[in-house]
């Protein structure tokens, strides 16, 4: 029940962030996107407000610079509204306002490949947090594409195992 309440709160924060960008003149999202929680929020294990662990995935658009700029700003707005709602920023900077935690499906494919090729302690921490992801806001078709890409990338890597 608590997870459902927190889910409603964070979805509202994402909606506020999208509306805020529209008011600031950036308009609606230029392409479809999904916003994911990861870590304890992704696993639905939040019993108290915790820190923010989240990322953005979006379609590649015709004008990649415009798309990149929009989602950079959206990531900043989401972090701002979540912070106002009581979620502290992640000390490890695993949030959508960081370039590493947002990108097109192709960028995410490249990231996963990089993580699987370099099994450093840092990359293992990133992988562990990432694979507890859960979509809370966004386009279902894009979410399905993203999950298929993740599954395919994991199979191809031969170094990352998920159940």
Image (cartoon, rainbow, N blue to C red):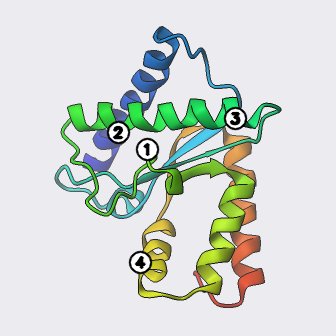
- Choose mark 4 or mark 1, whichever is in front: 1
Q: Earlier in the sequence, mark 2 or mark 1?
A: 2
Read off the residue under disc 2.
Answer: 79
Q: Helix, strand or loop at disc 2?
A: helix
Q: Of 2 and 141, which appears nearest the observer? A: 141
Q: Earlier in the sequence, mark 4 or mark 3?
A: 3
Read off the residue under disc 4.
Answer: 125
Image height check: is 12 above or below 130? above
- Choose mark 2 or mark 1, whichever is in front: 1
> Label 4, label 3: how many angstroms apart (C-alpha)?
30 Å
Image mark for residue 65:
3
Q: Quadrant of the C terminus?
A: bottom right
Neighbour tally class for label 3: few under 14, some 14-19, many 20 plus, Cα within 10 Å: few
Residue at 41%, 78% (x, y): give it.
Answer: 125
Could you tell me if the residues under marks 4 and 1 are in contact, i.e. CB atoms within 8 Å? no
- Choose mark 3 or mark 2, whichever is in front: 3
> Label 4, label 2: how many angstroms apart (C-alpha)?
21 Å
- Choose mark 4 or mark 3, whichever is in front: 3
> In the image, is 64 to the left or to the right of 35?
right
Q: Earlier in the sequence, mark 4 or mark 2?
A: 2
Q: Helix, strand or loop at disc 1?
A: loop
- Choose mark 1 or mark 3, whichever is in front: 3
> Label 1, label 3: how many angstroms apart (C-alpha)?
16 Å
Q: Helix, strand or loop at disc 3?
A: helix
Image height check: is 47 above or below 72? below
Could you tell me if the residues under marks 2 and 1 are in contact, i.e. CB atoms within 8 Å? yes
Read off the residue under disc 1.
Answer: 97
Q: Helix, strand or loop at disc 4?
A: helix
Neighbour tally class for label 4: few under 14, some 14-19, many 20 plus, Cα within 10 Å: few
Residue at 19%, 56% (x, y): give it.
Answer: 47
């Amino acid at each position: 029940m608590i997870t459902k309440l927190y889910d409603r709160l964070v979805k509202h924060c994402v909606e506020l962030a999208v509306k805020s960008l529209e008011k600031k003149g950036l308009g609606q999202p230029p392409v479809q996107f999904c916003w994911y929680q990861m870590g304890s929020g992704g696993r639905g294990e939040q019993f108290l407000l915790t820190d923010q662990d989240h990322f953005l995935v979006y379609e590649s658009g015709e004008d990649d610079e415009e798309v990149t700029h929009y989602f950079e700003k959206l990531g900043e707005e989401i972090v701002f509204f979540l912070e106002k709602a009581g979620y502290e920023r992640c000390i490890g900077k695993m949030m959508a306002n960081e370039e590493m935690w947002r990108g097109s499906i192709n960028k995410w494919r490249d990231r996963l490949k990089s993580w699987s090729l370099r099994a450093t302690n840092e990359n293992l921490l990133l992988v562990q947090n990432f694979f507890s992801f859960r979509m809370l806001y966004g386009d279902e078709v894009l979410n399905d594409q993203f999950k298929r890409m993740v599954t395919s990338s994991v199979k191809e890597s031969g170094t990352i195992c998920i159940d």
